[in-house]
Every structure is written in structure tokens, then in C-alpha cells.
Image: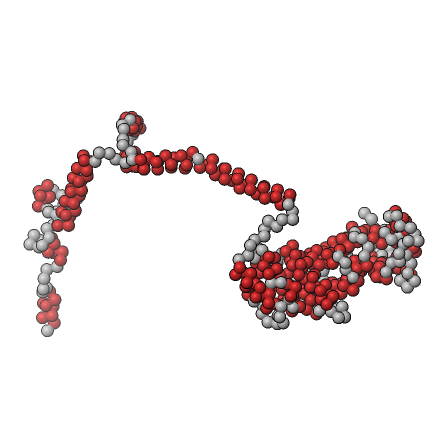
Amino acid sequence: MGKVVNDARKKQRHNPLDRDITTSNGTFKSTKSNGHGNVSDNEQEDEYLDATTSRKILQLAAEQQNEIESDEIKPATSFNQIVSEEVEETLESDEDEENYSDFEGQFEEEEEEEYEVEDQDLELFEKYFSTNNSGLNFNLGDKIMSLIQEKEDMKANQILNPGEDQTAVLLPPKVIAAYQKIGQILSTYKHGKLPKLFKVLPTLKNWEDVLYVTDPERWTPHATYEATKLFVSNLQANEAQRFVEKVLLEKFRTSIEDSDKHTLDYHIYRAIRKSLYKPGAFFKGFLLPLVDSHCTVREATIAASVLAKVSVPVLHSSVALTQLVQRDFKPAATVFIRVLIEKKYALPYQTLDELVFYFMRFRQAAQEELGVEADEMPPLPVVWHKAFLAFAQRYKNDITDDQRDFLLETVRQRFHHAIGPEIRRELLSGSPRLEA
């Protein structure tokens, strides 16, 4: 049985494909090559091409014949074709330098020939070379100079007309209508999330114009607190200052005036405290404008109570102290001076000297220099004496002996029966400041 199977395996139904290709009886003819891989002349005569190759050769021959006939019939060529043909001829040449020089001579002779160029191609040629080559740098330079001139003109107009708002824009009616509805919502807001359109206000470049549409005067105290938290946390200090001055300061004064007991609403109190997270915005947008306006002692006391409970960096406090003592005397300003002194900062010597000069200003000699007689000197309020006592208690070791003598003279002339002895005792117990 095994022998029959082996005989069947040896017997094949048909010849292999390579044997059909190489044998003379097969469908395909073999091309025998010599030792160098070249086909002999006799064998080349026996070869023939298939139908696809023959069709391609005939098609190429027909195309060449058509091109020859079209060149003989065509009267003129376009300028772009002439240039492209000449460029192709120069790129395809790989001859020596001598041959290349001969080619240049031939090319010059060909340039002398006259060609008929279409008007459209000629116009395109002149436009391209006149703008892209010769006029590009010149036009670009003029454009840059014109932009610089526009910027300089805008700056000059802002200097000549500082009252005009150059950045004001005309809001679309849809925006005005949408934010008027938001203003109506904020006029009755108590709790919950703010509208999304209101939350994107700090990201707008002209947020002040859009904020004015919402009518901040009608906001509830709850909405004022949420808006202060939103704007102070998302705006820079200089922009947050404008919000604090235009919105929060006005709400603060209105809340006290409208109250029956002249007290501040709790949510406005929280909003002022939240604004202190940007101390520069608070001092420049709230405290100093409040002092410069007609500020009462009660308003100053309420605002100072917020300032006393929040930690403020020493640099901001020292600058605020310097600004306050350089202004004219006001009881409201003295309230803030006392609160900042009682924070017990390690103030720089420059600020301490300004405080010393502030209290020395109320001596009789200093008042006479200002043209005030001794009999006309008004009595100082108690808040001034309390501020003087706080300064003596905290900074008695940071003043010089000369400054101590002048301050003792001020205590003698501006004596208070209850506070004066305490100020004198504190000043005398201190040690002089060490000078470099």
C-alpha cells in the first residue's frame, strides 16, 4: 500500500510553471543571455512584444507626430511657454564651461528674435515685475511708517484731549438687552449662582461699559458681595481699583445713609473685607477717595473696623500711612492713621519720620509758621490724642533724641488731661534710635 502512494506522489498531473516557461513547447519563450547578461542578435530577432507594449509605442508615436504637425501650423507662442522652454533647456544642460559659454551666445541670438506676445500675458508680466520686485520693499516701508504715524497721532490726541475716551465702543442692542435683564436679576438677587453672562464680565476688555448697563446702584447687598468677590479675584490691581471705587465705595456710603441707625449692611461689610485681598486696589480705590471726600467719623470708624481685622502687607500699609499724614488734617483720616499704627508694623524709618513730622505739625511754632495765632488754635479731637498715644507706645524706641524733644513739646502744648500724661511717660521711657 505504501508503494502505491509513493508512485502516485511522483506522478504529477501537469508540468510546473517554470518548466512551461523555459521549454520550447511552452506558451512563453525564454531569453537566453550570454555570460555578460547581453542578449544575442539572433535571439533578439525571435523576441516579440505583447499587445500592451505595442499599444503604448503606437500612442507615443502618434503624439510625437501630432506635436510636429502642430509646431508647423501654430503661428506664434505665448511668452510663458517661451520662457519655460528656455529655462528647461538651461536646466537640462550639463556640459563644460566652454560649451555653456557657447550656449549663452546662442541664447543671446535667440533673444534678438521677435515673438508675438499676447496682451494679457504682457500685462501680467509688467504687473508682476513692477510690484513684486521693485515696489515691494518701498510699499511695505510706507505701510509701516503710516502705522507708526497713526499711533503717534492717537497718543497726541489723548494728550491734547484727556477727557475723551478713546476706547469707548458702541455696544450691540442684543448685548444691552441681555445685560439689562441681568441687572433686573441682580436687583432681586438673594442667593444662588450668578448668571453665566455676568461671570464672563471680568474677561471683557470693555467690562466697565457693560457693567454700567446692569445698573449697579440697584444691586442688592448680596449681589454686591458676589460681584466684589468675582471682580477682585479675576482682575488686576489697577482694574480692580476702578471697580472698588465706582461700585463698592458708592454702595458703602449709600448703605450707611439709607440705614435708619446709620449702620452698614453685613454683606457690604463682607464685600469691603473681600476687597482687601487686593490691598493696592483697596487703598487707592476705597480708603484714599473716602478720606478725600466728605467722610464722617462714623464712616471712617466702620471702614477702619474692617481694616483692623484683616492682615495687610507692611509695604502697602506704610505707603498708605505716608499718604494719609501728608494730607490736611481731618478727624476721619486720623482714625485710619491710628488703626494702621496699632497694627504694630516694623515700619521703615522714612514712614516713621513722616509720622513724627505729622504730630510735630500741631506745635505752636509750626502753627505760627502757617499764620495761625496761638489763641485761634482749635482743640484737637480725642481720636488725635489716641493716635499719638499709640505711636508713642509702639515706636518710642525708633525715634531720635531730637524728635523725642519736639514730641514732648507738642504734648505740653496740646495737653489732654487723661491721655497727655500717658504719652509723656511712654516717650520718656524709650531709648534713642541708633543712627548709622
Task: In the rendered view, tell whether residue 34 sits above or below residue 329.
Answer: above
Q: Which residue: 71% across, 69% down?
A: 265
Q: Quadrant of residue 133?
A: top left
In the image, residue 224 lies at what x, y percent? 65, 66
Q: How many marks?
A: 0
User: Front-most of 362 and 178?
Assistant: 178
In the image, residue 373 lies at what x, y percent? 91, 50
In the image, residue 199 lies at what x, y percent? 57, 63
- From the viewer's perspective, is 40 left or right of 404? left
Q: Which residue: 11% across, 43% down?
A: 44
Q: Quadrant of residue 226?
A: bottom right
Q: Which residue is outermost to the left?
A: 25
Q: Which residue: 50% across, 37% down?
A: 142
User: Front-most of 17 and 299?
Assistant: 299
Q: Quadrant of residue 60?
A: top left
- From the viewer's perspective, is 430 left or right of 18? right
Q: Which residue is outermost to the bottom?
A: 1
Look at the image and tell me whether residue 404 can be seen.
no
In the image, residue 359 lies at what x, y percent? 85, 54
- From the viewer's perspective, is 224 left or right of 386? left
Look at the image and tell me whether residue 90 can be seen.
yes
Q: Which residue: 61% across, 57% down?
A: 208
Q: Quadrant of the N terminus?
A: bottom left
Task: In the rendered view, tell whether residue 219 sits above or below residue 239.
Answer: below
Report the colour scheme: secondary structure
